[in-house]
Image (tube, grey):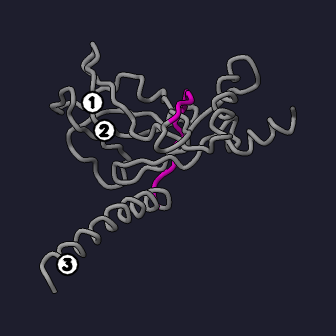
Amino acid sequence: MKPTLILLIVLFAIQLAIPGYMIFEQNQILTEGAAYKFKTRPIDPYDPFRGRYVTLSYAADQEVIPVMEGSNIESEDWVYALVGVDDDGYAVLEVLTDVKPEEGQDYLYLETFYRGYDGGFLVSLPFDRYFASEENAPKIESAVWRRQREQVEDVYAKIRILNGKGTIEDLYVNDILIREYIEKQAESQ
């Protein structure tokens, strides 16, 4: 075989392996990861390359997270954010550390971007897009924003977390899957 043919075969194999690994990793997080409810505030943009999606803003990434004593963290550092649950059952980022947590402790590997006055940091959660069909994305956005004047009280994303990475499993409104909620809204109109 010619060296250029071998090089092309290797190149094609790499091009197939990378997306294959990404799919495998997301599936592993969804099947093996711990589930957490992250309270959200969505808006509805459009991406011409990926289609419609709902951008999710989380309460957890709008709060300054304290730094674990003994950690040396600066802005734009990659850190481990320990994940816990508040009294209402929602996920909270409890503390940031520069030391990888022990086995059994759920955490997210995140980048800090702003130091608060108290020494803690703001972080940005990486799972901020919920993809929907062209038809459903505007309905999701509309349903979520109605919560201020109607019966929509609770909007959250169910996130699976495994080994520092998280992925969105689904979006809920008043503990109902968003797809079912939209169907019920359509039936009542």
- Give the camera-side residue of 16 and 83: 16
Query: What residue is rendered at 53% in x and 35% in y?
Result: 90
Depicted 23 relative to depicted 90: above or below: below
Position in image of residue 97 (x %, y %)? 24, 37
Q: Which mark is residue 88?
A: none
Q: Is residue 153 left or right of residue 47?
A: right
Which picture quadrant has residue 126? Answer: top left
Q: Is residue 65 left or right of residue 135?
A: left
- At label 1, the amino acid type is Thr
- At label 3, the amino acid type is Leu
Position in image of residue 35 (x %, y %)? 51, 49
In terms of secondary structure, where does tag 2 sit?
strand
Going by the picture, which residue comes out furthest to the top?
117
Asked if the magenta segment contains residue 45, the reply would be yes
Which picture quadrant has residue 64? Answer: top left
Magenta region: which residues?
Answer: 32-46
Depicted 18 relative to depicted 138: above or below: below
Dot 1 crowding, Cα within 10 Å, few <14, some 14–19, many 20+: many
On the image, numbered disc 1 is attached to which residue? 112
- At label 2, the amino acid type is Leu
Going by the picture, which residue comes out furthest to the bottom?
1
Query: What residue is rendered at 33% in x and 25% in y?
Result: 122
Q: Marks 2/1: CA distance?
A: 7 Å
Position in image of residue 96 (x %, y %)? 29, 34
Position in image of residue 149 (x %, y %)? 73, 17
Query: What residue is rendered at 53% in x and 42% in y?
Result: 51
On the image, numbered disc 3 is attached to which residue? 5
Q: Which mark is residue 110?
A: 2
Majority SS type along the magenta span: strand
